[in-house]
Amino acid sequence: MEEYQAWFDGGCGPCNPGGTATTAAIVKTKDGKVLLREGRLAGTGRGMSNNVAEYAAIIRIFEYLLPFSPAKVTVHGDSRLVIKQLNAKWRVGEGLCRSAALEARELLARLRSLGWQIKLLWIPRTQNKECDALSKATLADAGVLPEVQPSGIATEPLVDPINEETTH
């Protein structure tokens, strides 16, 4: 059975929500051959957020994989929300990303029904640099200047890896 590795990321700027949302999706073979490396504009305005962008990115991966013969794939993302919701660890609530979350769940179920073995894995942003850079480049291509994170402010919550609880 073929094996693939995939990564996704999304962002929204200069304001979140309500800004310009962009996505990044990468799919590689087991030996590292790039099959898909793509940044896209997800949309602009009121209905956009970083979570909508993250979901749009993983949806792109699922849609890309649909025509392939069933295989194994590990999908990596630094969105704890997307990974937890698609792994059915967190519920999908109301909000901007609800419809995208439900679409992603449907595509995931469809792929699995076709025989795909899919593992969804949360990784820290530092391990998702290629996708992060691609989504930011797509945002810059859309004419959006990046926000500068003030020094001394954490960009990710500190999480106890054993209990997966936020420590601040």
Image (cartoon, rainbow, N blue to C red):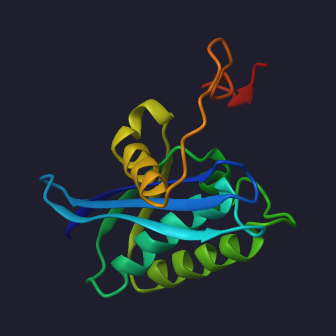
What is the tally of numbered marks visible in this picture? 0
Quarter residue 157 falls in:
top right
Q: Residue at x 71, y 53 (%)?
A: 89
Q: Is residue 85 above or below residue 127?
A: below
User: Picture quarter containing residue 116?
Assistant: bottom left
Percent across and percent down for residue 17 are: 76, 55
- As drawn, 124 above or below 152: below
In the rendered structure, the answer to whether residue 120 lies left or right of residue 130 reads right
Say which of 131 and 164 sits in front: 131
Left or right: residue 16 versus residue 80 is right
> Please, is residue 122 above or below residue 32 in the view?
above
Looking at the picture, how far across and down is residue 51, in whole percent? 67, 57
- Residue drawn at x 63%, y 79% as measured from the top left: 103
Report the residue that reaches farthest toward the right.
94
Instruction: Name the image quarter holding residue 42.
Output: bottom right
Question: Which residue corresponds to the image point at 75% horizontal and 60% vertical from the top-left?
Answer: 18
Quadrant into which the C terminus falls:
top right
- Left or right side of 154 for 67: left
- At x 70%, y 65%, the residue is 48
Work out whether residue 49 or residue 25 is closer to the camera in this orientation and state it.
49
Residue 74, horizontal then vertical, whole percent: 38, 56
Above or below — where is 46 with respect to 149? below
Is 122 on the left or on the right of 71, as rendered? right
Residue 86 versus residue 22: which sits nearer the camera? 22
In the image, residue 155 lies at what x, y percent? 63, 27
**Quadrant placement of the N terminus:** bottom left
